[in-house]
Image (cartoon, rainbow, N blue to C red):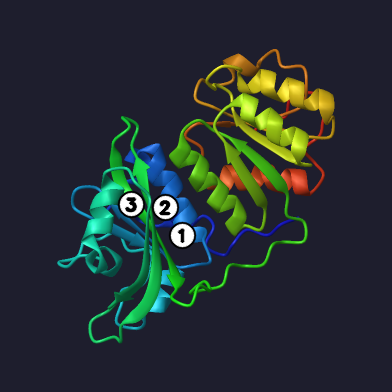
Amino acid sequence: MFKPSPSAGLAASHDWQHSDLGPRAAWPHTLRVAVDILLAAPWPMLLVWGERNIPVYNAAYASLAGRGHPPAPGALAGAVLPAPLAADQDAYSSALAGHAQHVAHARLALAPGAASLACDLHLTPLHDEHGRVAGVLYALDADDGAPASAPAPAAASGLRVLVVEDNLDSQYLVCEMLKAFGHAADGVAHAEGALALLAAHPYEVLFSDVSLPGMSGVELARQALREAPSLQVIFASGYGDALLRHVEFPFQSLQKPYEIDQLQAALAAIAGGAARSSGPSNV
């Protein structure tokens, strides 16, 4: 069974009440997922959130910055811009407009008095529940093309997971989180594309939103199981379990907005061989 990162659960346990982000319970879903993934990731990542450019960063980022940088997880807006944002404000502005960016050979001064570092920056815009860009997620790579902090090797029991989610920000974040924990993950936005991928690759887990454009996640799983009866199914639903009451095959379900730890627990049950049952198994 795969072992979660030592940082797993840090977002839930940290006292955000007195940070600029406020209590975690009031965060939008995208922010909660982004912070969970960022803190669990083994490579340096920084989130810049909201009009005040509130920074949240992980231990790998703080370690890269050196002793002069505050420790993770951050979330108190400083008097100066975060170094990756300051290095290329045009790229940040483009990300705020909804366009993913790649900045090669950026020179970063991550802490006062520290030597500058050469990094490639990958910027991903994050949308709120109204479809507006509310934050930008940075991933840092060493300038030579190798990761600045090498990703953890895949766990021997890592699972191959297909994520079906029509919110592209959530899809991306969940896939990145799964990869950080040693799983192989692909994402797709609709059931038809999922069926094509399932026919082409031997996935072990289907993690699907119940409500999808066109064919529902339930019907997707039903068709997928006809071709691959050993496929494990996890549903995410924002409507409680009302749509899942009469499902005839075994599954696990997560209520949106779910915690990353809940998805980890569902996958751990599958990796441990405990997910199959004679009836629905709901988390």
Left or right of residue 42, residue 191 in this image: right
Could you give the CA–CA distance between mark 1 and mark 3, rounded to whole angstroms?
15 Å
Decide: is 196 above or below 98.
above
Give the vertical position of 261 relative to 2 (above or below). above
* Amino acid type, mark 1: Leu
Instruction: Count neighbours of disc 1 (C-alpha within 10 A) and say few if under 14, some if 14 to 19, many if 20 or more.
Output: many
Kind of residue at badge 3: Val
Q: Is residue 147 left or right of residue 85?
A: right
Q: Which residue is mark 2?
A: 35
Residue on which disc 1 sits? 39
**What's the CA distance linking mark 2 and mark 1?**
6 Å
The quadrant where residue 227 appears: top right
- Screen quadrant of the C terminus: top right
Instruction: Check contact, mark 1 vs mark 3: CB within 8 A.
Output: no
Q: Counting residues from the N terminus, which is met first, the one under dot 1 or under dot 3? A: 1
Is disc 2 in contact with disc 1, using a CB cutoff of under 8 Å? Answer: yes
Q: Are marks 3 and 2 in contact (CB under 8 Å)?
A: no
Secondary structure beneath label 3: strand
Q: Residue at x 27, y 55 (%)?
A: 92
Label 2 secondary element: helix
Using the numbered discs, state the Cα–Cα distance from disc 3 to disc 2 in whole angstroms: 12 Å
In what quadrant of the picture does the N terminus appear? bottom right
Other-residue count near label 2 (Cα within 10 Å), few / some / many at <14 / 14–19 / ≥20: many
Give the amino acid at mark 2: Val
Query: Residue 75, percent across and down?
Result: 30, 59
Q: Secondary structure at mark 1?
A: helix
The residue most toward the left is: 79
Depth check: 151 or 242 in front?
A: 151
Comparing 205 with 258, the one in front is: 205
Residue shown at 27% from the left, 79% from the top: 111
Q: Which residue is mark 3?
A: 136
Residue in view at x 20 percent, y 65 percent: 81
